Amino acid sequence: MTCELSMEVLENAGAVANRAAQAIAALAREAIKARGRFLFAVSGGHTPWMMLRALAAEQIRWPAVRVFQVDERVAPAGHADRNLTHLQQSLLEHVPMRPEQILAMPVEAEDLGRAAAEYAQTLQRECGSPAVLDLVHLGLGPDGHTASLVPGDPVLNVSDKDVAVTGPYQGRRRMTLTYPAINRARHVLWVVTGAEKVQMLPRLLHCDADLPAGRVRGERALVLADNAAAGGSKKGA
């Protein structure tokens, strides 16, 4: 695995969100020019919602964009715990996208295992077989998790499915992209903000396989971090 991820450090979460929006827009224009569409998977979190709102100011051919979820909590539609709720608010209210351009994980299904398989089929239908996303956006948890790939969960060992369902984590089960799906992506964008990440960020940068986040391939990845997460480092700023 290639280590020593490329990193830029910015002043604060707002600056990270704006830089992330610029990076996404550049990749979107490149993908649309090359293949006619931009296939983008988004994680949850406060800074990503800022990032998506900043993305509205960028020049993108929005009808050519398809947005997928990296992970989702098992919760009712419209619930504040749902990443989809914030994703829709951040995008649909600010950019000329149709609701069907956001392909939501079906976490309201009674049979979650079957629902995960159906979402994997959706990925194949939209992104090819095997599914290749243009960009996967990821965050880093204080415990080293990313997506809903959390320490100790059996999903960490899934190698034959693109989508899986976790055990309970912070009170809820999750549906998540697995390593195979994430590691096939053309690009990975890490958005890491907050002082609670300061111990985990160096381990991510060195692809520490003891961390769930450290098992994501690094050669096509960019890490955008704020000063708090980077411990005051100015590297790449």
Image (cartoon, rainbow, N blue to C red):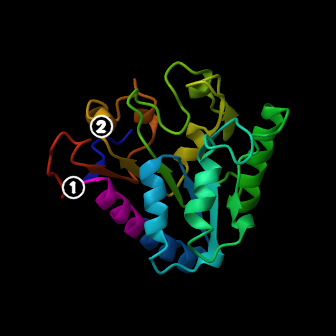
32 left or right of 7 in image: right
The quarter of the rendered structure image containing the C terminus is bottom left
Mark carried by residue 11: 1
Note whether 85 is above or below 162 in the view shown.
below
Does residue 170 appear in the picture of this structure?
yes
Q: Is residue 164 left or right of residue 232?
A: right
**Rendered residue at 16%/51% (across/down):** 235
Q: Which residue is mark 2?
A: 201
Q: In this rendering, is residue 105 above or below 99? A: above
User: Picture coordinates of residue 92 (x, y %)?
Assistant: 63, 68
Relative image position of residue 37 (x, y in whole percent): 62, 72
Q: Residue at x 29, y 61 (%)?
A: 15
Where's residue 48, x and y in %?
A: 46, 54
Tell me the SS state at disc 1: loop
Contact (CB < 8 A) between labels 2 and 1? no
Q: Amino acid at mark 1?
A: Glu
Q: Give the residue drawn at x 76%, y 45%.
A: 106
Mark closest to the chain's N terminus, 2 or 1: 1
Residue 2 coordinates in the image, percent (x, y): 35, 42
Figure check: 234 above or below 23: above
Q: Main secondary structure of the magenta part?
A: helix
Please give the label number shown on residue 191: none
Which quadrant holds residue 175? top right
Amino acid type, label 2 = Leu
Q: Is residue 83 magenta?
A: no
**Is 14 included in the stretch rendered in magenta?**
yes
Q: Residue furthest right?
A: 110
Query: Closer to the observer: label 2 or label 1?
Result: 1
In the image, which residues are magenta? 9-23
Quadrant containing the N terminus in the rendered view: top left
